[in-house]
Image (cartoon, grey):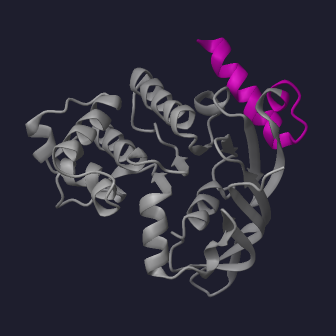
Amino acid sequence: MSAPLLQVDGLSVAFESRDRAALLALDRVSISVADGECVALVGPSGSGKTTLARAILGLLPDSARVVEGSIRFEGQDLLTLDDAGWSRLRGKDLGLVLQEPAAALHPMKSVESLVGESLLLHRMASGRDLRQRICGLLEEVGLPASEALLKERPHRLSGGMRQRIGVAAAVAGDRKLLIADEPTTALDAILRRQVLDLLERRRRDHRTALILVSHDLDRVARRADRWIVLDRGRVAEEGPAQRLLEAPSHPVTKALVEEWFSMRSAR
């Protein structure tokens, strides 16, 4: 059996509060993700999903620190990387779609620059080919590849448009792992399906591993191969999506599944 693409072992992350007491956000979390696999990282708000996603990408805030554990990507210990190492890895092999797109998009850069930044930085495209790939990515997320949009700044666009631009930028190039933290929050049902379909095509066509982070099973339930359920900073339950959907054993998983079935029956 080949080694997993991503391996997190015994990871604990603490935040310092105002009174300097350490608040444990992750408590000895261990997960793995295989090449090309789609994993849903689910759990109620405050369960540690976003903290885990940011730890994997080296994007924890200054108030957070890794207490113990390891994070390995293709066998490389990510916790030993310096800023330059993280920049190379995030730009080429790792991608992130944030819940709040404005936080990831530089307000002074054009849409064309934002979407094409990693392609240009890592010499994956240039000139006319770069412009064509940028336009293709915009069209994939349901945006017109017009000259006006390419020159526009993100702060002048709607939240839904910024979200789709963030998705286009995140999937540019051939990422090996993409983490999508509530990637469809600002979108209506049609655009939500379109963006999730795009992520699925990327996974299928490029063997991109995908971690879908959500508190809402309705958005990720049947798209994932496997669920990892977090509760209060710990892994509560994990397993094949179909099995957990049909026979959840942990109370948190049961509550999420019951809520999902309730929402579906109410439609």
Residue depicted at x 34% and y 39%:
164
- Give the quarter of the figure containing the C terminus: top right
Q: Is residue 193 left or right of residue 65?
A: left
Image label count: 0
Q: Position of residue 140 (x, y in %)?
A: 34, 30
Q: Is residue 149 left or right of residue 69?
A: left
| Quadrant of res 232 | bottom right
For residue 250: magenta? yes
Q: Is residue 198 above or below residue 213?
A: above
Q: Is residue 146 above or below residue 116?
A: above
Seen from the viewer's position, the closer of residues 240 and 208 is 208
Magenta span: predominant SS is helix
Q: Position of residue 29 (x, y in %)?
A: 78, 63
Q: Which residues are magenta?
A: 243-267
Q: Position of residue 187 (x, y in %)?
A: 39, 32
Q: Is residue 179 above or below residue 141?
A: below
| Quadrant of res 246 | top right
For residue 11: magenta? no
